[in-house]
Amino acid sequence: MVSAHAESNEPAAPIGDGGLVRLRLDISYDGTDFSGWARQTDLRTVCGEIEDKLGTVLRQPVQLTVAGRTDAGVHASGQVAHVDVPGELLPDDPSRLVRRLARFLPKDVRVKEISVVPGEFDARFSAMRRYYEYRVTNAAFGVEPLRARDTVSYPKPLDLGAMQEASTRLLGLHNFAAFCKRREGATTVRELQRFDWAQEGTVFTAYVNADAFCWSMVRSLVGAVLSVGEGRRTADWVAGLLDETSRSSSILVAPAHGLSLVRVDYPDYSELAARNAITRETREIPSSGGCCGD
């Protein structure tokens, strides 16, 4: 598997109908002043900024497909998107677009790398797993000023061991309906592959990986486990949420600004088409997995 693009010194060549070339964009942004990723009328969004500025550079409108549509206030250091553009509009080395874009983009969003990828590469459907981190501090004084935009103040005693126990109970393939804002026609079945906590002084960081996440899932997971850490809930309560078939009103969703998308993994190029097909299939709980479907 690969988590970064393959390097190439070859000039861009058309790889699809109409002479289009597919580009992968590796993106970082501070989500504080954005209304999320997705373009919205009269609102400042990450997608809107990049599409507008890249369209200006290429002198043609473009449309991005993204690995994960982050909510308002959520950050990213490892976001990935793809876009199809006519080959004749590209320089021989598409990575030169990075410097050109840097002159147009605002300081709170950067396109760090641009590379040519196969036509089968899909930033959303080819993704094998997504990695998030969530930062919270229980320092009495609040958040260190230099980390105020990506760390949440939670000035309560927190039991790291209890939080880890609760997180471990959620690992695996489950219906996470209790933790998700339901979208019509979207499954809430996900495979949670990692949910660990680390403590450094008064800062607690959650590391959360899954094949994919449904809407507000990570912040709901964090919010539920923080309630265990402060002693209001138990690990059994958290595990019991997996038996629910709709969103639970007992979960306090953690604030958006503590969350960052830090990485997206993709398979080798030869496996892209197969991965796309797998991702599009409806996820089902195996018979040994317990409770429920959608």
Image: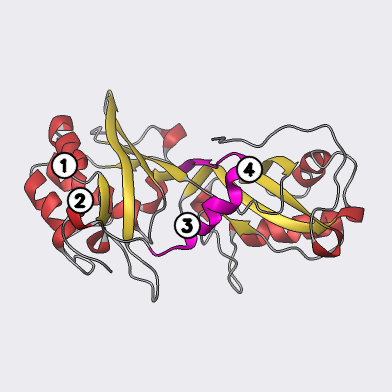
Is 259 located above or below residue 86 in the figure? above
Q: Residue 241 location, x and y as percent?
A: 15, 57
Q: Spatial distance from mark 2 to mark 3, Cα to Cα?
A: 27 Å
Residues at circles 4 and 2 in contact by the CB criterion of under 8 Å? no
Judge left or right: residue 157 versus residue 281.
left
Q: Which residue is mark 1?
A: 166
Front tag of 1 and 3:
3
Q: Which residues are magenta?
A: 261-282
Q: Nearer the viewer, residue 80 or 30?
A: 80
The amino acid on which the numbered mark 3 sits, given as a three-letter code, is Thr
Residue 165 picture quarter: top left
Judge left or right: residue 48 versus residue 281.
right
Q: Spatial distance from mark 1 to mark 4, Cα to Cα?
A: 38 Å
- Residue 270: image tag: 4
Residues at circles 1 and 3 in contact by the CB criterion of under 8 Å? no
- Residue, x 22% and y 69% (percent of image)? 246
- Residue 27: image tag: none
Q: Spatial distance from mark 1 to mark 3, Cα to Cα?
A: 28 Å
- Residue, x 65% and y 62% (percent of image)? 48
Q: Which residue is mark 2?
A: 224
Q: Spatial distance from mark 2 to mark 1, Cα to Cα?
A: 9 Å
10 Å crowding of disc 1: few (<14), some (14-19), many (20+): many
Residue 182 picture quarter: bottom left
Q: Which is nearer the N-term, disc 4 or disc 2?
A: 2
Q: Residue 139 location, x and y as percent?
A: 25, 32
